[in-house]
Image (spheres, grey):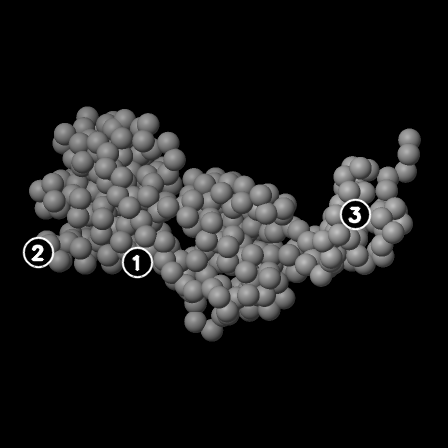
Amino acid sequence: MSKPLTIKDIAELANVSIATVSRVLNNNSWVADKTRSRVEKVIQEHNFSPNLIARGMISKKTRTLAIVVSDISNPYFVMLVAQIEQLSLQAGYKVTLYDTQSANRSSTATDIIPEETIFHSIRDSQIDGVIILGGNIDYNDVPADYLHELNILTSAIPVVVVGRQLPGVDYNCVERDQTTCVTLATKQLIEKGYKEIGFIGGSKNVYITRERVAAFRQTLENAGLTADENNIVRNNFYLQHGFEAIENLLAKKTTLPQAFVAINDHVAKGAIRALKDHHISVPDDIAIVSCEYFPGSEYFIPRITTVNHQNESIGKEVMARLMKLMNESSSEITSQKMPPSLMPGESC
């Protein structure tokens, strides 16, 4: 079996220096077209595939990105990670995924990996750029240790955060619009004549819940309606929490409102299941809308009226920003929120 070619071998065959081969492999513009063509011809003729680690030792780049996600089982993160990974591969980068499981803190079956530990690991690895999806940055009270480690990470490696911009920490952020989604969903109910409307899902400790519940109250107030605090249940973001919200309300022997706004499609589905168990039909007896679309909800019965946060656009924006940061052109980056859109269904 013949010995695999090295960069040195390619340089000798193309009659150029090792540095020139390295520049060609790393797409450096400081190579004459004629020389680049000669090197590329040799590479193609010998099916040369450079070892990423060896290549990284020369260029200090491994074409590897890290994605830090707080719960990969959450459909929102699944969609976003898949989109980012596809775009990364198209750009010639491989992806390393770190799943901290910090989003579902109520789970006793899953070990939570401290994000500070993940940041340490990334800094010690050959990583070209980092994308952070949720986690401690989503909580109302962000731990000081987390902010400290995030500052160190962003000073060492290009980082893009999908979440919110915090004062005192210098990082590039893609923000989702957490209020328009609620306004769209709640207005849909109001326009259909519903006046008694509740809100279910979300955690009290998470800023997304705080912002969405505030937008819910404000939308009702703008329409001359009042939010009944007894019908606002903030327990968490998953299927079982929509189910439990309805069960808890019914256990109190209170009369349910005419409609509910659910924080996402999972919570909406869990609520619909609980209502069905009690022979309450959606939308005939009670209406439900969701603030956040998850793939597959359009096949649920009834099809859920929900809000699309344009994850495909978010993924593209994240990658565009990270590429600019890695190319040291961050001055061209401007902050903007992704506008959501209503997806009418059958649940209201």
The answer to whether residue 82 is seen in the rendering is: yes
User: Which of these two is toward me, 278 or 253?
Assistant: 278
Kindly identify which residue carries mark 1. Answer: 211
User: Residue 213 falls in which quadrant of the image?
Assistant: bottom left
User: Residue 346 falls in which quadrant of the image?
Assistant: top left
Q: Position of residue 124 (x, y in %)?
A: 69, 59
The answer to whether residue 254 is seen in the rendering is: no
Q: Report the residue at 31% width, 58% height from top.
A: 210
In the image, which is nearer the foreground, mark 3 or mark 1? 3
Q: Name the disc covering residue 38, or none.
A: 3
Q: Badges 3 and 2: C-beta atoms under 8 Å apart?
A: no
Q: Residues within 10 Å of mark 1 (few under 14, many from 20)?
A: some
Q: Quadrant of the C terminus?
A: top left
Q: Name the disc covering residue 224, or none.
A: 2
Q: Is residue 315 above or below residue 330?
A: above
Tag 3: amino acid:
Arg
